[in-house]
Image (spheres, rainbow, N blue to C red):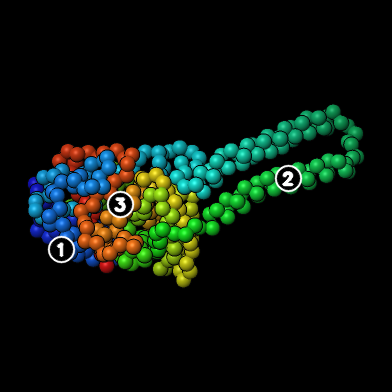
Amino acid sequence: MKYLGWAIALAAAGLTPTASGAQTPTEAAPQATPTPQSATPAAEAPATPTASADAIGSQANVPATAVPAPGPAPAITFAAPTPGVGIPNGDIGIQQQVTAVGQGAAAFHNGPLLIMCAGISLFVLLLLGYTMIKFRRSANPTPSRTSHNTLIEVLWTVIPVLILVAIAIPSIRLIRAQYSPPPADVTVKVIGNQWYWTYAYPDNGGFEIVSNILKEKKEVAAGVRFRTEADGPPLLAVDERLVIPAGKVVKFIVTSADVIHAFWIPAFWNKIDAVPGRLNETWVKVDRPGVYYGQCTELCGARHAYMPIVVEVVPEPTFNAWIASKGGTPKGAAPSTEAAVTTTAAPAPAAPPAPAAAVEQPALNQAVTRN
Ligand SMILES: [Cu+2]
């Protein structure tokens, strides 16, 4: 019955759960106002979400019967995360990197740096042990008076210098790569707020989306959108994802509307402060479509732990369609009226297709929002 209620609500208002205010309450961000009719000018859109040209593998979570034809189709179905990629999975060490800078940095850390650290630690430990045993008091009743040894002093100065130079050269090369962005294909302005993120696409019509954490089912009232497994793990799932195209240089201009936050997606190897009144810049180029999770990493107040970041990397055609569905304009294109997009990432596991699951997951239909 609840399921039927959703279907009726969709048909009557042309709204998806998020658009109808199913939003994390209280401190939740001001949501972009949905435009019930014009935002989804797809009354003729196929009733089956998977009929989208961009559906590439994972199927939409809403069965065909959930959308009463010929009403407006639910707009966006996001991909589910891929275990082990872009998401913490309990492993120690650095997350699998999906950018060239990240891969270089992780390889440098996991290879030469760890080997050097372990070697130096072991050497110092052995030296200490040797000294403690060989020069113990009982074996040396008359202590040595040696105070200088030119050779050793030169060695313990020169060798650390060489080690530091060996670390500095690849490190500086990596820093230069990180802070010398190639010309951007897409620009996203990232704004930290207490305690949510907004993402604006200035080159694509300037629309802005608001991204709030998704609460657990038991924390929200009936009918309000809650987190599902397809959204991601607890405390990391959001209602609106930051969508970027695969294989393109994406520039992030990062700032804040209130206090200092930090924008961090571990799989991208980028962490940059969001400072009020200041524009910081970082960039990524991700070839692998998928869902990548991050968090605010600057203590920014009481709900600092509740402003996660979710980036979904999609093929460029899907990205352009998503832009259009948000009321934006794909770069270099005339304003589009396309809607009813299914954004999916290739390796994502299919979400449960059972109607019962759809009842439990009213949230997967993303609202079409526009400014
Ligand atoms: Cu923050």
Q: What x and y, as percent, mark residue 365? A: 22, 51
The dot on residue 162 is 2
According to the image, label 3 marks what residue? 317
Q: Residues within 10 Å of mark 1 (few under 14, many from 20)?
A: few
| Amino acid bearing label 3 | Pro
Asked whether mark 1 and ligand 1 are closer than 8 Å, the reply comes as: no
Q: What x and y, as percent, mark residue 315? A: 33, 48
Q: What residue do we see at 54% from left, 58% from top?
A: 180
Distance from Cα at disc 3 to Cα at disc 1: 24 Å
Closer to us: 53 or 212: 53
Mark whose residue sits in front, 3 or 1: 3
Mark whose residue sits in front, 3 or 2: 3
Image side of residue 174 versus residue 200, left or right: right
* Residue 276 in sight here: yes
The image shows residue 233, relative to residue 13, as above or below, that is above
Q: Residues within 10 Å of mark 2 (few under 14, many from 20)?
A: few
Instruction: Pick whichever of labels 3 and 1 is earlier in the sequence.
Output: 1
Q: What x and y, as percent, mark residue 27? A: 31, 62
| Amino acid bearing label 1 | Gln
Helix, strand or loop at disc 2? helix
Closer to us: 292 or 249: 249
The dot on residue 37 is 1
Q: What x and y, as percent, mark residue 328? A: 29, 63
* Residue 266 in sight here: no
Helix, strand or loop at disc 3? helix
Q: Residues within 10 Å of mark 3 (few under 14, many from 20)?
A: some
The image shows residue 178, relative to residue 98, as above or below, that is below
Image side of residue 357 versus residue 65, left or right: right
